[in-house]
Image (spheres, rainbow, N blue to C red):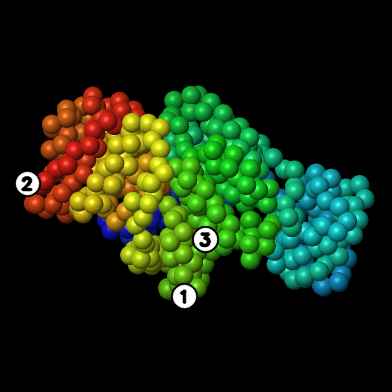
Amino acid sequence: MQRATKIIATLGPASEKPDVLRDMIRAGLNVVRLNFSHGTVADHRARYDLVRQISKELDREVGIMADLQGPKIRVGKFANGKVILQEGARFILDVNCELGNEERVGLDYKNLPNDVQAGDRLLLNDGLIVLVVDQVKGGEIYTRVESGGPLSNNKGINRAGGGLTAPALTEKDIADLDAAISMGVDFLAISFPKDGADMAYARQLADAASAKHGKGKARLIAKVERAEAIVTEALQSIIDESDGIMVARGDLAIEVGNPAVPALQKRMIRMALDANKFTITATQMMESMITAPVPTRAEVSDVANAVLDGTDAVMLSAESATGQFPVKTIEQMAAICIEAEKSEVVHLDTDFLDQRFERIDQAIALGALFTAHHLNATAIAALTDSGSTPIWMSRHNIRVPIFALTSRVETQRALSTYRNVRPFSIGKGADRESALIQVEERLKKLGVVKSGDTIVLTIGEPMDQPGGTNTLKIIKVR
C-alpha cells in the first residue's frame, strides 16, 4: 500500500502457472504484459483468462497490456542454425536467400535494400554484431563485418540512426490488435511509431475493434524506440495521440547509441508528465535476476533513477517471462521503488504557480492535492467514474496516497498504470451520503486511516457523470 510506482511484468512460461501468478500479484504486480512477439493468440487468450480468474480470486484488479510486435526486421534462417561472423569478413543480406550460410542470409523485410546505402551501419542481434554497407545491388546488400560474433536464426536488424520505412503496424499487428481487443485488454502497446499519425491510425483500428466486439476502449501506449520518434516535434505528436508512452530502451539504444538513452529517458518522462500522460520505463531493469536471486547494484540504481525521474511504472520482460525468480524479482523491484520514493521532493507550491485550469475537475483535483499537502492529510479519496480526477492528481509528487473509488471495473483497471493511484471498487448506484460512508469504512478496513485522521475527498454532484467532479470535501475520520 505504501508504493506509488507501479510494476508491470511479462507473463510467460515461468509465470503462467496459477500459484506463481497469484504470488506475483501478492508481491505487488499491477499490470500483466502479454508479449505478442511470442506465442499464439490462443496462448495469450489463455493467459488473459488466467489473470482475470486470479484477480477475481484475490479481489485485486490487475491491468492487462497487449504488446504488439511491430515491424521487427530480422534475418532469415541458417542451414545450420547459426554462423560465426569474423571481423573484416564480407557478408551479404539477400532478400532471395532461403537458407543462410557463412556468406549470406535472407531477410524477412524485403524492402530493406531500398532503405540503406553505402556507409550505413546495420546492427544485428541487439547491436552485438555491426555490419557496414559497402554497396546495394538489387535485392542484395553487400556488407563488411565491423564487429563479429555468432549470428543465429531470426535475429533483429536495426539501422544506426534509424530511417527504416517499415510501417508501425504490420498485417500481423492488425490481426493481433483485433484479437487483443476481443479479449478485453486494458492497454495496447504500439511498437516503433514514427510520429503521431502512426498512433492515430492505431487508435482508429482499436476503436473500430472495440465497436465490433462490444468491448471498452483500450488505452494506447506508444513504445518510443525509433530515432525518428525522439525528434521533439515527432515525440510531442506521439505523446499527444497516446494515453501513455513506454521508454523502450532496447531498440532505442541500438538506433541512437547507449550513451544517449539516460538523458532521453528523462526528457521523455518530463514531456509526458507535462501532457498529463503516463510513462513506463522498460528493458533490462532487473536483467541479472533471470538467473540470480538478487539484482546487481547497477540495476538497483537504474530502477531507483527511473522512479526519481518520475516514471509511473517500471517493467519486467524476460525476468518474469522466462526467469528463475519471477516473484522475488517483483519483491525486489517493489522494495527499490519504496526506498527511492522516500527521497522524492514535493514541489506542489511551485508546481502550481503558473498552473492554468482548463476544466472544473482539473481545478478540484489540484485543489485537493494542495489541501492534502498543507493539512498533512492521511489520504486523498476520489470518487470517480472515468478516472480523470485521480489522473490529474497523479501528475504531481505528493506523499499522500490517492485512492480512486469507482463502480466501473474498467476504470479500476485503466488506473493500474498511474503513479500513486490505488483504485478500488465502490457499490453501484450509491447516493452521496452512503458513498461517503463507504469511502471512510473502506479506508479504515484497509488500515489506511484511523479515528482522528483527515481525508481530503473529491466527488461530483450529481454522481456518476464522467468528468463531473465539482466538489472538494474534508473529512475527519470518526
Query: Quick one: label 3, few (<14), some, or many (20+) residues within 10 Å?
Result: many
Gap between marks 3 and 1 measured at Cα: 19 Å
Residue furthest front in the image: 353
**SS under mark 2:** loop
Tell me which label, 3 or 1, sits earlier in the chain. 1
Q: Provide residue 363's location: percent of width, then percent of height.
A: 33, 36
Q: Which residue is mark 3?
A: 318
Q: Provide residue 254's location: percent of width, then percent of height.
A: 67, 60
In the shown orientation, is residue 57 left or right of residue 276? left
Residue at point 63%, 62% (across, down)? 260
Q: Which residue is mark 2?
A: 478
**SS under mark 3:** helix
Residue at point 53%, 26% (across, down)? 208
Q: Which residue is mark 1?
A: 297
Gap between marks 2 and 1 measured at Cα: 45 Å
Q: Provide residue 133's location: percent of width, then percent of height.
A: 85, 59
